[in-house]
């Protein structure tokens, strides 16, 4: 079974009822072990609407959580340092480094946020990179 790290955008869209995000997550249930980064947890809680709290907590509790270790922090810092892009955010570097640390595929709707070449990526539409 493969490991997949879910990007924040997929989970927010799922929580907001977007059909493509719901279908995508449903398709992964039997084919992968699903993870999210603690960075994703922070990003979701930062954007969460109060009436979404219970559903959000239940969803996040259903995934394996990746804590930020020194190794992940160093990898993220190296991504940010080496990849010259004004739009590359440190939080995305941390999520990518989290995926790299467990040899996982990173599932995202924002593939352009992840220019890293040493991790596998998958979009909601099913395209792999």
Image (cartoon, rainbow, N blue to C red):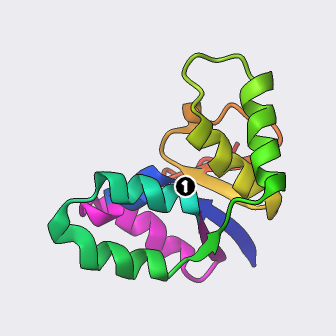
What residue lies at 34% left-to-right and 53% top-to-bottom?
A: 46
Give the x, y percent position of residue 39: 55, 55
Name the quarter where the C terminus is drawn: top right
Mark 1 secondary-structure assignment: helix
For residue 82, say whether it is visible.
yes
Residue 101: x and y in percent read 81, 59
Most foreground residue, 2 or 51 = 51
Query: Residue shown at 43%/52% (left/top)?
Result: 43
Q: Which of the 4 image quarters holds residue 70?
A: bottom right
> Which residue is nearer to you in this view: 116 or 91?
91
Q: Quadrant of residue 50?
A: bottom left
Q: How many marks?
A: 1
In the displayed structure, 35 sits above or below 110; it is: below
Q: Is residue 60 left or right of residue 86?
A: left
* Of 86 and 110, the residue lying toward us: 86
Q: Is residue 20 visible?
A: no
**Circle 1 crowding by C-alpha within 10 Å: few under 14, some 14–19, many from 20:** many
**Image spot of residue 62 (x, y percent):** 49, 82
Instruction: Determine the residue positioned at 24% across, 63% down.
Output: 17
Q: Residue furthest left?
A: 51
- Is residue 63 on the magenta stretch? no
**Residue 53 in the figure: left or right of residue 43:** left
Name the residue that disc number 1 marks. Answer: 39
Q: Is residue 35 magenta?
A: yes
- Residue 1 in the image: state x and y as whole percent: 75, 79
Q: Which residues are magenta?
A: 14-36
Q: Taking 24 as reference, is 55 above or below it? A: below
Residue at 37%, 82% in the rendered image: 58
Q: Kindly give the residue lying farthest to the front in the view shown.
A: 70
């Amino acid at each position: 079974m493969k490991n997949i790290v879910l990007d924040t955008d997929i989970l927010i869209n799922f929580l907001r009822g977007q059909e493509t995000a719901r279908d995508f997550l449903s398709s992964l249930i039997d084919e992968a072990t699903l993870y999210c980064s603690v960075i994703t947890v922070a990003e979701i809680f930062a954007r969460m609407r109060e009436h979404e709290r219970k559903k959000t907590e239940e969803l996040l509790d259903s995934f394996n959580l990746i804590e930020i270790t020194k190794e992940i922090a160093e990898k993220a810092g190296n991504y940010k340092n080496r990849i010259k892009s004004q739009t590359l955010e440190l939080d995305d570097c941390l999520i990518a480094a989290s995926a790299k640390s467990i040899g996982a595929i990173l599932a995202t709707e924002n593939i352009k946020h992840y220019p890293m070449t040493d991790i596998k990526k998958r979009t909601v539409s099913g395209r792999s990179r």
